[in-house]
């Protein structure tokens, strides 16, 4: 599958490595331009290329976004039409600046991203896992219930299933927290599942549902 990745930091670069290892073709971008990603691309090998943000969005059947949330309005809206977008961003006011609608719990950061990328099907995922754990904890040999959980939330069931399959391919278990509103809120910083080292079984017990795939 062709996967675009926007953001090449702790999460973006490590996710790129996992996706390439699983046999996918990736295009990646950061804010400073493709020439600054030469070392990463040569490490990733022939199934990776660095391009502009807009080209990444056009390249991917899935586009994985991992940038500081506060920058989301810089993303070119039209380039994402028809795409499945994975939103791994979290809102941290100290880093991102304050967004009143989030501080007042009127919406969630993923709904704001979805509003900006109107033609995309946004799935919130990869938000709750620390990048060092993402690097090391995937294990395709483990049965699903014993794998580390990565959560998915979204309004489009088919898009969530596609993202869930990708999560399983890299050795994790996908656990559904619901739609982008309530399910998205359930994955935010300071929730019961945020940055917790949980297996799929443990995660389902906390969420009190059969939300796995
Ligand atoms: N760190 C974690 O363990 C973790 C876990 C789960 C979720 N998250 C969330 O994932 C997101 C990324 O975190 P991170 O730790 O990977 O951050 P990071 O290491 O600081 O990397 C951020 C990346 O985003 C790029 N970027 C910034 N503004 C951009 C823009 N306007 N357009 C395109 N690319 C842009 C940066 O490129 P330049 O360097 O060129 O500016 C950099 O490659 C954040 O929202 C974070 O809260 C982080």
Image (tube, rainbow, N blue to C red):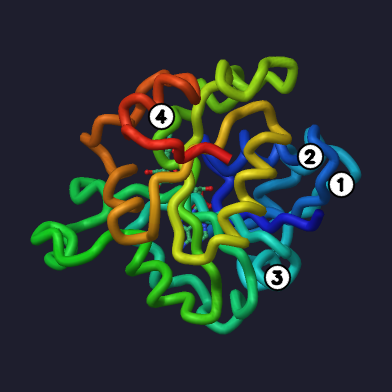
Tell me the residue at 46%/21% (across/down).
201
Tell me the element at label 4: helix
Sequence-wise, the earlier of marks 2 and 1 is 2
Say which residue label 3 marks. 55
Proximity of marks 2 and 4: CB atoms separated by less than 8 Å: no
Quarter of the figure with residue 78: bottom right
**Mark 1 Cα within 10 Å, few/some/many (few <14, many 20+)?**
some
Tell me the element at label 3: helix
Tell me the residue at 42%/41% (across/down).
127
Identify whether 32 is placed above or below 202: below
How far apart in space, not on screen, are marks 2 and 1 (Cα)?
7 Å
Tell me the residue at 40%/20% (across/down).
202
* Left or right: where 65 falls relative to 90: right
Query: Foreground mark, 4 or 3?
Result: 4
Tell me the element at label 1: loop
How far apart in space, not on screen, are marks 2 and 4 (Cα)?
29 Å
Residue sitting at the far right: 46
Task: Indicate yes or no: mark 1 CB to ligand 1 under 8 Å.
Answer: no
Residue 193 in picture, x, y percent from top left: 32, 31
Sequence-wise, the earlier of marks 2 and 4 is 2
How far apart in space, not on screen, are marks 4 and 3 (Cα)?
38 Å
Say which residue label 4 marks. 204
Query: Foreground mark, 4 or 1?
Result: 4
**Mark 2 Cα within 10 Å, few/some/many (few <14, many 20+)?**
some
Task: Indicate yes or no: mark 2 CB to ligand 1 under 8 Å.
Answer: no
Numbered mark located on residue 47 in the image: 1
């Amino acid at each position: 599958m062709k996967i675009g990745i926007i953001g090449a930091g702790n999460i973006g670069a490590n996710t790129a490595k996992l996706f390439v290892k699983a046999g996918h073709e990736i295009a990646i971008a950061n804010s400073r331009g493709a020439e600054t990603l030469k070392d990463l691309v040569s490490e990733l090998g022939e199934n990776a290329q660095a391009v502009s943000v807009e080209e990444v969005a056009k390249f991917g059947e899935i586009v994985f976004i991992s940038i500081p949330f506060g920058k989301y309005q810089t993303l070119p809206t039209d380039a994402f039409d028809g795409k499945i977008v994975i939103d791994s961003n979290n809102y941290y006011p100290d880093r991102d600046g304050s967004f009143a609608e989030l501080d007042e719990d009127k919406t969630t950061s993923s709904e704001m991203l979805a509003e900006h990328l109107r033609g995309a099907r946004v799935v919130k995922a990869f938000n709750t896992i620390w990048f060092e754990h993402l690097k090391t904890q995937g294990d395709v040999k483990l049965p699903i219930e014993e794998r580390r959980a990565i959560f998915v939330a979204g309004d489009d069931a088919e898009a969530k299933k596609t993202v869930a399959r990708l999560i399983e391919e890299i050795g994790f278990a996908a656990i559904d927290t619901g739609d982008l509103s309530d399910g998205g809120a359930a994955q935010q910083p300071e929730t019961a599942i945020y940055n917790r080292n949980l297996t799929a079984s443990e995660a389902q017990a906390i969420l009190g549902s059969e939300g796995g795939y």
